[in-house]
Image (tube, rainbow, N blue to C red):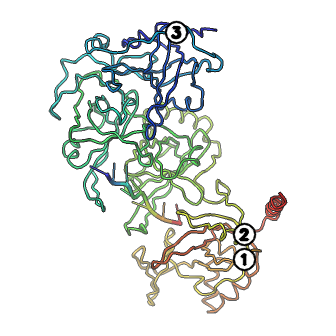
DNA sequence: CCCCCCCC
């Protein structure tokens, strides 16, 4: 059997805290450790041909390799990035474990076909003495380099003992963030505070309180840490963004991806016994500043709505500042939409709110780096929205920023991007063909967010009552105005009176297809297409002749259109019913419609 | 233990 150049003797060096560049190891066994919340962690038995160790862990960054079957029994791997950590949760006293952060598969298990050599199990037990001797003066973790370094540290006589908590934890062995799990609570991490939230209060049926959260980073990974109530008083002012702290004795629990974009399966909570202690050593400077897990825009259509992601893009277009009232709270809201593009030639809308929307300045197509923005879905498109925990930077001094700048200046500015935030239209919006009977039989619209479908519909009857109304003249506001009978019109939404108004259509109509019929609502722009008149023209006709609407509607009766409809549950006066809105009408494209019919006929015939 | 984050 070929020996695949295993790095004989490498494990002895590494497991004593020494350095070894890109060791080549054979995987002898792989085991999922702890199921349930921790299903993404794997323990491996690895060999260098001479020795083997059973405490090698694969961290989440490499797990796609493992689940896809690349890393399997007998395969040979090159460890590109790894660290060691001393743990005390294996039931065998203090032991050093190997954490592989990044690897390359050199030969698959199938190709190798069996164990190489006769490796002997290495004793990985450590004594406090040994860990001190083996540790170097270098930073505890060095994830960017291809070398390993030990995580044990020489106790630093110069370390200042800070008075948060009674125990000095700066002398204890430091663990990488990526090694933390809920199954192990004896650890100390050394991490930089990337970001700290404002203090927020809450009040609900379960009680009330206050909280803040911060994001911690080291060379191995990142984690969110939240403090409630007393912890807010104890640590909020003490902890400062960009500084480095030793942190210990927090409670770990599974992270919720809906609220956090950090790459960690867990997050932690400060408890009464937790310790946070500032690190004043010079070696703190080697810890990373901030970590981004950028998602390219072409992936956003597939992202789960309401999850939180990191994004980077060039500002292609800056929308106007818009002001409106929130329907739910009545509060005045300000927003501004930015259109961002990236190297995948994809454009996405990023919505800024409040002061950030008002004050946004961005000439010369700057780069926007958005950490922790929320994916939202509207009208079949996906967009990004800033939330309170988001962090927006313009042209920050990071490598990705220069890369995207280079792309845009060289070619990106000349290319038409695919806008994934565009609602309906040709973009990503596609609604399945349905008949009204199928819509009813299949119970569409009974879900949370409503369903879209398209139908070849015939207008059977347009209600002439209230089909046109006098609306607020403000461009973004279409609220019906109150005629004050003195030449002025009042908009309750804008809380203003105007000498003028605009006409808007809101048509209710009965639409039929071969299977049945359905009442649908249609807003202004689509109703204008159906009537073949603008709202203004309709309004003017009615001003001349009060009952002109029935004649206008009659002209549209029995016309056929392809209608894209949304059916959704609506609750009004405690009564829930299905409401259908026709969001788009198009002239019948017979070629497309016939193709659909032919397909259905073929389905029927099997 | 929060996790609301708004509108079309």
- Which mark is drawn over residue A366? none
Which numbered disc, 2 or 1, marks the residue that appears first in the sequence?
2
Q: What residue would you read off at disc 3?
A: A49
Asked if residue A419 lies left or right of residue A242, the reply is right
Which quadrant would residue A577 be assigned to in this image?
Answer: bottom right
Mark 3 — on which chain does it sit?
Answer: A
**Between tags 2 and 3, which lies in front?**
3
CA neighbours of label 2 inside 10 A, class few (<14), some (14 to 19), many (20+): many
Label 3 SS: loop
Number of marks present in the image shown:
3
Which numbered disc, 1 or 3, marks the residue that appears first in the sequence?
3
Q: Nearer the viewer, residue A501 or A290?
A: A290
Label 2 SS: loop
Query: Residue A119: x, y in percent?
Result: 50, 9
Q: What residue would you read off at disc 2?
A: A435
Mark 1 — on which chain does it sit?
Answer: A
Query: Residue A75: x, y in percent?
Result: 58, 19
Relative vertical location of residue A596 with respect to residue A89 in this rendering, above or below:
below
């Amino acid at each position: 059997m070929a020996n695949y150049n295993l790095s004989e003797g490498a494990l002895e060096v590494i497991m004593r805290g020494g350095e070894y560049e890109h060791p080549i190891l054979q995987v002898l066994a792989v085991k999922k450790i702890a199921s349930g919340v921790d299903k993404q962690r794997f323990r491996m038995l690895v060999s260098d041909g001479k020795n083997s160790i059973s405490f090698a862990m694969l961290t989440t960054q490499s797990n796609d390799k493992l689940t896809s079957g690349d890393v399997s029994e007998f395969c040979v791997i090159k460890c590109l990035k790894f660290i060691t950590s001393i743990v005390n949760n294996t039931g065998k006293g203090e032991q050093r474990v190997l954490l592989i952060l990044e690897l390359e598969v050199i030969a698959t298990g199938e190709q190798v076909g069996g164990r190489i050599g006769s490796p002997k199990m290495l004793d990985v037990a450590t004594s406090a003495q040994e860990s001190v001797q083996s540790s170097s003066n270098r930073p505890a973790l060095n994830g960017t380099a291809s070398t390993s370094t030990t995580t044990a540290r020489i106790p630093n006589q110069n370390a200042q003992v800070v008075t948060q908590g009674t125990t000095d934890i700066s002398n204890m062995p430091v663990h990488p963030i990526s090694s933390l799990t809920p199954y192990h609570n004896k650890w100390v991490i050394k991490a930089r505070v990337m970001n700290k939230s404002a203090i927020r209060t809450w009040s609900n049926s379960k009680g009330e309180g206050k909280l803040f959260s911060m994001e911690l980073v080291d060379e191995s990974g990142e984690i969110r840490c939240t403090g409630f109530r007393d912890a807010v008083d104890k640590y909020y002012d003490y902890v400062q963004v960009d500084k480095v702290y030793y942190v210990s004795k927090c409670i770990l629990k599974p992270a919720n991806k809906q609220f956090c974009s950090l790459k960690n399966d867990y997050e932690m909570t400060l408890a009464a016994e937790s310790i946070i202690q500032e690190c004043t050593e010079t070696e703190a400077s080697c810890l990373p500043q901030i970590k981004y897990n950028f998602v390219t825009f072409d992936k956003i259509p597939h992202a789960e709505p309401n999850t939180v992601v990191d994004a980077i893009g060039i500002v292609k277009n800056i929308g106007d500042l818009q002001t409106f009232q929130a329907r739910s709270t009545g509060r005045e809201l300000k927003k501004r939409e930015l259109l961002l593009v990236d190297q995948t030639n994809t454009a996405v809308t990023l919505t800024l709110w409040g002061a950030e929307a008002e004050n946004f300045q961005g000439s010369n197509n700057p780069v926007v780096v958005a950490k922790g923005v929320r994916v939202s879905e509207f009208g079949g498109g996906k967009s990004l929205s800033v939330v309170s925990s988001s962090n927006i930077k313009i042209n920050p001094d990071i490598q990705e920023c220069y890369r995207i700048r280079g792309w845009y200046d060289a070619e990106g500015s000349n290319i038409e991007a695919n806008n994934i935030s565009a609602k309906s239209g040709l973009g990503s919006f596609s609604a399945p063909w349905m008949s009204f009977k199928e819509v009813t039989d299949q119970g569409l619209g009974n879900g949370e967010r409503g369903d879209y479908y398209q139908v070849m519909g015939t207008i059977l009857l347009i209600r002439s009552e209230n089909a046109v109304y006098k609306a607020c003249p403000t461009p973004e506001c279409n609220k019906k105005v109150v005629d004050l009978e003195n030449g002025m019109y009042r908009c309750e939404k804008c809380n203003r009176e105007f000498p003028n108004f605009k006409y808007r259509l809101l048509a209710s109509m009965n639409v039929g297809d071969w299977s049945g019929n359905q009442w649908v609502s249609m807003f202004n722009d689509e109703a204008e297409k159906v009537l073949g008149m603008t709202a203004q023209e309709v309004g003017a006709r009615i001003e001349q002749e009060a009952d002109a609407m029935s004649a206008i509607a009659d002209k549209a009766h029995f016309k056929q259109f392809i209608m894209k409809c949304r059916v959704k549950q609506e609750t009004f006066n405690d009564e829930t019913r299905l409401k259908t809105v026709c969001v788009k009408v198009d002239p019948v494209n017979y070629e497309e419609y016939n193709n659909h019919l032919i397909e259905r006929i073929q389905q029927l015939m099997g």
